[in-house]
Each structure stands twice: as C-alpha cells, then as structure tokens.
Amino acid sequence: MAASAAAHSLGISYLAIQAGLKEYSTLFGRSEKIVIDGKTIMVQLIKNPAGASQAVASCVKDDKARVLIAINDNLADGRDISWLWDADFEQLSQGKAHIIVSGQRAHDMAVRMKYAGVDQSLIATEPRLATALKDGLDKLGPGETLWLLPTYTCLLELQKIFKGMGHAMSGT
C-alpha cells in the first residue's frame, strides 16, 4: 500500500501501479509461498532479532501452522547466534504448533524454545535439514501450513533440496 500511495503521489497512473503490483514477485526466501503435492510451505528468512520476531508473529497468526526453524552459524549467517535470545520466540509458547528445530545449531535452538516457554512435547530436534523438511511435510495435515524460518545458509540449502524435489524458489 505504501508503495502504491508513493507511486500515485509521484503522478504514476493507477493502471501502471496495478500492472506493477500484478508483476511483482517476492524476493528469494522472503515471505515466499511454495506448494508441493498440495502442501503449503511459507518461507520467511530470519537473520536478526527484529526480522525473526516479525516472522514468528506472522506464523502464530496461522492457527494451522507447523514450524521448522533452521539455524546455521556459517560466515554468511554471522557466527554469533546470541541474537536468537533477543528475538521474540516467546510468541510460540501461546499456541500448540509443532516445531522442528534444525541446522548446525538445532540443539541451541531447542534450548531457546525451552526458555521461550514452548511445550517441550511440541519440539522435535533434527539437525539434518533435508530430514527435518521431509518430517515436517509428512506430518502436515489438511489445511496446515509448514512455516520455514531459516537463516541464510539454511535457505540456500533449502533451495537445493527443493530443486532436488523438482520445485524452484523465487529467483532461482
């Protein structure tokens, strides 16, 4: 809406604005929706406390959400994962969403979920991302969405996994 309003204030016609919005596609891994075999996946890249908090806020609004959080600490992600403690993962403690934690720092994320107050019976730890994704998809029920919240290098790994499944992410 803000972009549309700004464009209009600059004198761009409604038809041009409408055409621009119609042609828009999301950036790689940012609020990207993928459907595989009728199962909906929503990808939200997380890389800092503010972005992670907003991504979590989006998925907790979905009463049929399952969540896969994938955390790596490679150079491109940033080696310091202390930001996970500044993100508002406590929002996840309010619901009954099943959560899979994955990636190189899966066990650290499981601890973070515990301190966020998430029911431990709802948390599964699977460091191997391909296995975690398969488990998440296999357990999706009708109408449920798998929310993927990966750090950058996990997102790149997911891109390869999806390609291997015959699906492509935006911009790939």
Image (tube, rainbow, N blue to C red):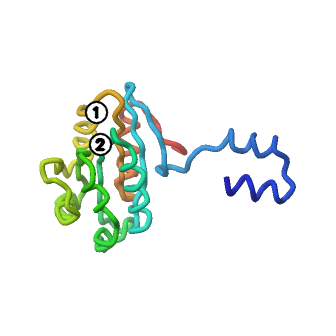
Give me the residue at 26% from left, 47% from top: 129
* Foreground residue among 74 and 84: 84
* Foreground residue among 61 and 141: 61
Type of the residue with mark 1: Leu
- The residues tagged by marks 2 and 1 sit, at their Cα atoms, a distance apart of 7 Å
Residue ID for mark 1:
140
Residue 136 in the image, given as x and y percentages of width and height: 26, 39
Give me the residue at 31% from left, 58% from top: 91
Q: Quadrant for residue 83, please give it.
A: bottom left
Residue 134 in the image, given as x and y percentages of width and height: 25, 36
Q: Do the residues labelled 2 and 1 touch (CB within 8 Å)?
A: yes
- Pointer 1: residues within 10 angstroms few (<14), some, or many (20+)? some
Give me the residue at 65% from left, 44% from top: 24
Residue 55 marker: none
Residue 66 marker: 2
* Foreground residue among 79 and 85: 85
Residue at the farthest left position: 121
Residue 82 in the image, given as x and y percentages of width and height: 29, 74
Depicted 74 relative to depicted 100: above or below: below
N-terminal label among 2 and 1: 2
Under tag 1, what secondary structure? loop
